[in-house]
Image (cartoon, rainbow, N blue to C red):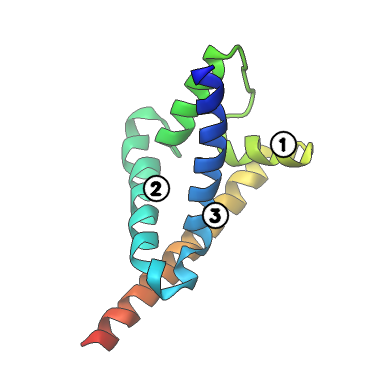
Amino acid sequence: MAYQFLNIFFFVFHTLLMLFNCFGWAWKRTRRWNLITLLLTAGSWFIVGIWYGWGYCFCTDWHWEIREKLGLYDESTSYVHFLLLKLTGINFQKELVDKVTLVVFFVSLALSTWLNFRDYKKKG
């Protein structure tokens, strides 16, 4: 019962976190938090990823562990690929999903950095 709750929790939490990473820069009130979550994501992917594999994500790892305890074994190593497959039923090419994910991430990071810097300069 607890694992089923955690499975749903991670579907919701991780999806909302990804959407916030993509669009949180758009609102002035959320920009600072958006930059923080993007930098934490980058740290997970590119720093912790040195030891656990490029693109390592704590949320994905924890969700996979929960799904394994439920007897669910997913073939995808990419959470975005997994989510797209679950939501649409379409098995997109993993390499394409990874490339689009990376582009969206860096565009979001650039926008968030620029807008946070601009807001900081306006404050004076």
Q: Please, what secondary structure does the residue beneath circle 1 have?
A: helix
Residue 19, which numbered label?
3
Residues under labels 3 and 2: Cα distance? 13 Å
**Residue 60 rendering spot, x and y as whole percentages:** 48, 33
Q: Are marks 1 and 2 in contact (CB under 8 Å)?
A: no
Q: Nearer the viewer, residue 107 or 65?
A: 65
**Residue 43 rendering spot, x and y as whole percentages:** 33, 46
Q: Please, what secondary structure does the residue beneath circle 3 have?
A: helix
Residues under labels 3 and 1: Cα distance? 17 Å
- Mark nearer the N terminus (3 vs 1): 3
Label 1 is placed on what type of residue?
Leu
Residue 41, which numbered label?
2
- Mark nearer the N terminus (3 vs 2): 3
Question: What residue is shown with label 1?
Answer: 85
**Residue 30 rendering spot, x and y as whole percentages:** 40, 66
Q: Nearer the viewer, residue 46 or 7?
A: 7
